[in-house]
Amino acid sequence: MVLYARVGEAIGHQPRRKAKDEAAFQRTLLSFLAAIAIIALERSGELRLPFSNAALSAMGMRPLKDVRDQLEKAGLIEVRLGFYDIDHPERSKLTAITPTPKLVQLVQESGLSLGDVVRPPAVTTVLTEPFTSAGEMPPKVREQDRLIKRYNEGIGGFTLHQPNGWTSSRIHLVRLFKHDWITGGRLYGGFWIDMPRVERATLLIDGEETCELDYKSLHPHILYAWSIRKLDFDPYVIPGFEHVSREVGKKVFNRLINGKTTALKFIKKDYQPYLQSGKELDAFVAAMMDRLSPITHRFASQAWGQLQKEDSELALKVIERCMKEGIPVYPIHDGFRVRLRDKDQVEGIMKEVYKAIYGTNPSVCMK
């Protein structure tokens, strides 16, 4: 409410309104401030809104035009007016609104954070393209959904940001399954998940340095565990092909797991300079399948869906343990960005959770 009061001071004297109209104006102002404050805190983007009477009535915000004009007059927002083309609706443009430096300063001085204005989503577990046989959400998935909701409620108490202060309102997680409740299930939604690794490495948590912990070669290890075997070598490094980088080996493995055939197409930009031709790629695939013979029956079998469900459940158990310890954690599928000072504790949690499920000690690496 500090921002609300400061904006009221900046607007200053306003025309007299009937009590009912004044109440509607103040409600609309409060709603608008919540939206524009997100733009100010993220330091990027703009609000795009329709201002026709029909649109404002449909939104229940008829005073919005008045709010816009008052804030623009006070120098708090910049407005680029849109228009509606009745003959060619597809050419219409929404009005674009951005906060001015004056409003950005008010937001900063008010002590407002994204957690104060961004509310978690009501639906946090989604089944996409459901089969008719999928049925209702299973009890275990429902219990895990409650954990995601608790995470979303609490994560706003911390701020993940770049060194220049930039952050995003996309801090809440949503779990996505595909077709049924045993396929997929990974966590999405957080802005850090899609960031390039180089940029993600610069992120801070409330000004503190962070690091990223990752289960090394998780999916091959899970596949070996399903076969009641222990994987004690790097599955992405193939004898006889030492010149092929580990990253290319990982790419080949993932395509064998995710694809519908083990006959991979040679794509120059993906494999050169390590593999020079389709024939050499075929030889590499054959050598990998020979080295990983205990699990090759999983190749081209659509095992990716089960693996994603498995790694999502592992991630949720790690998140739950970290929440109990009061440690902020930002998952990237089977990895986690955490404060550097929490590294050893989180690494211990990751190892304990994995061993409790699979009975072996995992390799956890820092990126």
Image: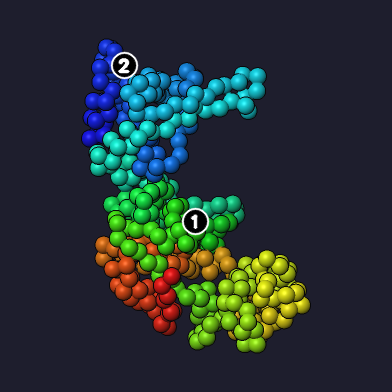
Contact, CB < 8 Å: mark 1 with mark 2? no
Residue at point 43%, 42% (across, down): 44
Mark 1 or mark 2: whose residue is earlier in sequence: 2
Q: Residue at x 48, y 26 (%)?
A: 80
Residue at 28% from the left image edge and 41% from the top image edge: 108
Residue 67 in percent (x, y) is at 36, 22
Is residue 311 visible in this depiction of the protein?
yes
**Which quadrant of the rendered structure holds the C terminus?**
bottom left
Task: Give neighbour class at mark 1: few <14, some 14-19, many 20+ (Cα, 10 Å).
Answer: few
Residue 266, placed above or below residue 75: below
Choose mark 1 or mark 2, whichever is in front: 1
Residue 318 lies, with reference to residue 48, above or below; the image says below
Residue 27 in percent (x, y) is at 31, 26
Which of the numbered marks, if any, corresponds to residue 264? Answer: none
SS category of the residue bearing label 2: helix
- Give residue 348's position: percent from left, percent from top: 33, 75
Which residue is pictured at 28% across the width and 23% down the height? Answer: 11
Left or right relative to 294: residue 33: left
| Residue position marked by numbered label 2 in the rendering | 21
Please tell me whether mark 1 sits on a helix, a strand or a loop: loop
Crowd tier of the residue under label 2, counting other residues whose Cα lies within 10 Å: few below 14, some 14–19, many 20 or above: few
Give the camera-side residue of 47 and 264: 47
Q: Quadrant of residue 280?
A: bottom right
